[in-house]
Image (spheres, rainbow, N blue to C red):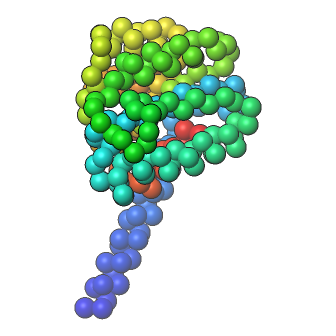
Amino acid sequence: MDQDDDQYRWESATGNAINQNNRRKELAQLPNVRLGMMRHRYVVLDMSDAMKDQDLRPNRLFCSIELLKEFIFMYFDSNPTIPNRLNNHTKETYQECEGEASIQTALEMGLQTLKHMPKYSSREMLFVLGCLTTCDPANILQTLKICKENEIRCSVISLSAEVRVFRKLCVDTKGIFHVIMDSSHFQELLQFHS
């Protein structure tokens, strides 16, 4: 019995190490990452009802805020002369999550700032989303087209599942789309984007 427990622990530890190694290799091979370039990044945090879910401890919102704090420090550490925009999406306070997210509104806010940045710099938006829907005032496909024309690269880290419009946003703008598996994977993805 004791030997079976040891074998199970060894297989579990080995499997976790292999999975983490494979994830790191996958992230290292992603294209469109240019170091030493001026970067302008707009970060959008979803503040909809979906952020109240407790699949991340204590909930998605709290976990996201804590990891985004670390992300901002890492981002400025690796890019000390770069401006950063942190947009609190939907609500002004972190405690209140209500309503539905509007990706189009967030894109338009980011576009207003990023389209005026110089063409030689990298203009990026990073969405951290827990929602499965987007409640937009108009046709979001037109806004995606404007992002593509202005060469604004949009990446999405989804906390719930793959959503077609989020994937399309990333594909059209040459961004990266990921769905997290757990909080440690979430942290790895944020480190990759810094």
The answer to whether residue 62 is above or below residue 117 is: below
In-front residue for pair 37/20: 37
In the shown orientation, is residue 143 left or right of residue 164? Answer: right
Relative to 95, is 21 on the left or the right?
right
Q: How many marks can you see? A: 0
Q: Is residue 81 visible?
A: yes
Relative image position of residue 60 (x, y in whole percent): 36, 48
Residue at figure coordinates x 35%, y 73% from the top left: 11
**Residue 167 x, y percent position in the rendering:** 34, 27
Q: Where is residue 110 drawn, in percent x and y? A: 50, 20
Q: Which of 8 and 168 is in front in this view?
A: 168
Quadrant for residue 15, please give it.
bottom left
Is residue 149 toward the left or the right of residue 90 in the image? right
Residue drawn 28% across the image and 49% down it: 53
Q: Can residue 163 be seen in this view?
A: no
Against 188, residue 86 (above or below) is: above
Which residue of the protein is positioned furthest toward the right in this rendering?
81
Quadrant of the image containing the N terminus: bottom left
Task: Please report the residue visible at 49 percent of the width from the left and 8 percent of the height from the top.
Answer: 149
